[in-house]
Image (cartoon, grey):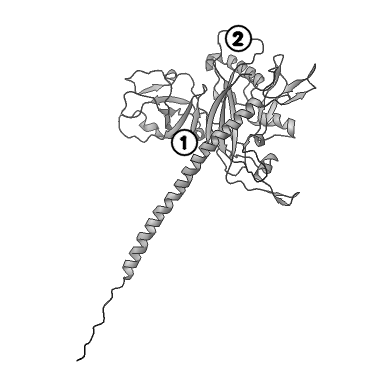
Amino acid sequence: MSIRLRPSRRHAFTLVEVLLGIIILAIGLLGLASVFPLVVRQQRAAQDGVVGVTAAGAAESFLTQHRGYLDTSIAPSGDMIGLNTPSGKSGWGALSWALYKTAWAKRNEDFGLIRWSRLLDEDNPDGQTAIYGTKAETAAGGQFTTGRLRGAMYFPRYDNNALVPGKGVAIRASERLFPTPGPNVNPLFVWDAVPMLATAIDTNQEITTQTALPLRVTVFVRRIDQGIRLPYDPQTKTTMTLGDAIAKGVVLPLGSDADGMPSQNGLGEYPGFFYPSVQTAYRRFGSQSGAFNVIRFKEGANSVAVAAARQVGQQLVDNEGNVYTVVALPDETGSDIPYQNDLDRCVVIEPGIPTGYLLATTSKNRQSDVRHELQLLCTPQVPAHVSTFVVRP
């Protein structure tokens, strides 16, 4: 008796099923891939925040310990040229006097302190405070090289209540790198310091004798441009290190375009600061109490400055040293939102604006114009860290 076995029938995947599987797998891989850049950015931001604190500490140490050198050409027996000098005629002491003269000249407009725009305006006729900008770079260049020294800070020197040209203190961008460049060590950050009078001056009584007043210094730590292309050094026949390229002025640690926005390649001009003016502060939609943590910049404020200030994570500093973090951009909708037509000029900050800046602060008011001229200082890039400390010359 013979038994005939039937062949088993095996089902294979059809072409449509294979294509559907590939599409599903591709979608999953694309979704997974989209997460990686976000994770990398968050990890770098967290790392920058930690290292930025260390960089700010190094900046504070540099600024409070810088003694400079003895200049014997200054009659009668010479004097120190540095940030921290016993005579107070150079560095912090001279700068504080320059700031006092500026504050006194504009006491009726600035209420004893100084607006950021007035402090950082190199064409300001009311005080010789060329800290950054073309004039500062030119003055610094006269000490180290010919022409401008881009990215340099410059502190004036005063003696007998008069400016002494060519005897100020210059700090090059290459001196503000962190970590300090060396063998197999490339810098990651560059810091900048913006000084301001620590407290408002007495607007009723002028000081006529040169006096050293306490200063509050704000330090901004920023990551060096990531797109810098290192040049070839014809002397060593090798590619320059980043530290050498910055020290020799071939590239800048930070570069900006004609609008002042980051170029990301170390070329252009050294980026300055933005200081858009605030017009109104609001409570968040639906809140009848609490902080005024939505601010609207003035309609006439520089659009580039407003765009820089509206970056999430940006740090904004008022001229009293309060630091605010941009945590979000307002996105509420509704007919009763007072700033719904101005959302492109608004940011959400933490903490909120102090009540001393507001015209109306009762619990029934959800919005208030600000007092005086409130300007918030920021850099074009979102800094890794911002800190303040007090110097007593």
Nearer the observer, 303 or 38: 38
Q: Position of residue 259 (x, y in %)?
A: 56, 37
Residue at the (33%, 70%) spot, across then down:
15
Q: Is residue 389 left or right of residue 95?
A: left
Q: Position of residue 329 (x, y in %)?
A: 41, 35
State the residue lying farthest toward the bottom.
Answer: 1
Residue at the (43%, 30%) spot, across then down:
349
Q: Which mark is residue 206?
A: 2
Q: Quadrant of the C terminus?
A: top right
Q: Nearer the viewer, mark 2 or mark 1?
A: 1
Q: Secondary structure at mark 2?
A: loop
Nearer the observer, 356 or 339: 356
Count residues near mark 1 (Cα–Cα under 10 Å), then give few for <14, some for 14-19, many for 20+: some
Nearer the observer, 347 or 230: 230
Q: Is residue 180 left or right of residue 30?
A: right
Distance from label 2 to label 1 (Cα)?
Answer: 41 Å
Q: Secondary structure at mark 1?
A: loop
Residue 197, quarter of picture? top right
In this rendering, does residue 28 appear at all? yes
State the residue lying farthest toward the left.
Answer: 1
* Residue assigned mark 1: 313
Q: Position of residue 91 (x, y in %)?
A: 67, 23
In this rendering, does residue 126 appear at all? no
Residue 347, quarter of picture? top left
Count residues near mark 2 (Cα–Cα under 10 Å), then give few for <14, some for 14-19, many for 20+: few
Nearer the observer, 370 or 240: 240
Residue 96, quarter of picture? top right
Q: Amino acid at mark 2?
A: Glu
Residue at the (40%, 25%) spot, across then down:
281
- The answer to whether 36 is drawn above or below residue 167 in the figure is below
Q: Amino acid at mark 1?
A: Gly
